[in-house]
Amino acid sequence: TVVPIPATSKGRARAGTYIAVAPSVYVGDNQSASFVVTSDAAFACGSDAYGKLGRGEIAGEGRARTATTLSLIDMPRGEKLASLSAGKYHVLGVTKKQNLFAWGSNEFGKLGLGDDRHQRAPVRVDIENKKITKAFASESFSLALTARREIWTWGKGTDGQLGRGKIGRKA
């Protein structure tokens, strides 16, 4: 299937239309945002609370702007998303180079960056230089699977959901 996608970048129409063959479509955890990953680029629309659309724009803490058309996700040069997982207010993306990127709310450290700062554009998550094949974003924690089949978890662990044998607000 060939799907035409009208694209915008930072609120401006981009020249031409992206054409994708069999795009992958993802919906955010609370169904307030949609994401489309094609062979060439990734797009998002819906609520931009905490920057979860990955457009790099600043809307204020927790204040959501709304994008009613698909907007280009602002990936770093040379990186193209292969898949993503959208949690309630954060997103994890795995690139074709098997690098992990995160953006949106960083409450409980769920972006895996070692701090609690929200990110409005994709930021690389370094898990000991491991290649990542899959990532999963929940409401309050994150999980990644490496190419060597190791599972890494981070974020809120108050109910033992991180699987580390300990319970804590942030682990």
Image (cartoon, rainbow, N blue to C red):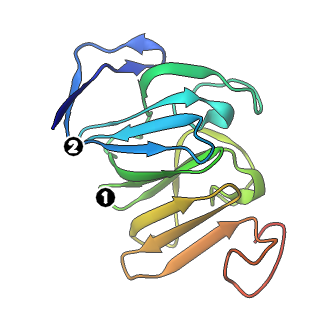
Q: Image point 48% across, 36% down: which residue?
A: 34
Q: Are marks 1 and 2 in contact (CB under 8 Å)?
A: no
**Alpha carbon distance from label 1 to label 2:** 20 Å
The disc placed on residue 97 is 1
* Type of amino acid at the residue the image marks with label 1: Lys
Name the quadrant containing residue 56: top right
Above or below residue 78? Residue 100 is below
Query: Is residue 166 visible to the viewer in this orientation of the structure?
Result: yes
- Horizontal and vertical percent for residue 169? 84, 67
Q: Nearer the viewer, residue 33 or 58?
A: 33
Q: Nearer the viewer, residue 156 or 58?
A: 156
Task: Where is residue 65? Give x, y as percent.
Answer: 64, 21
> What is the crowding at mark 2: few (fewer than 14 residues within 10 Å), some, or many (at least 20)?
few
Residue 153 shows which numbered tag?
none
Residue at the spot 34% in from the left edge and 46% down from the top edge? 79
Q: Position of residue 100 (x, y in %)?
A: 46, 58
Question: Which label lies toward us, 1 or 2?
Answer: 2
Residue at (44% x, 34% y) in the render: 73
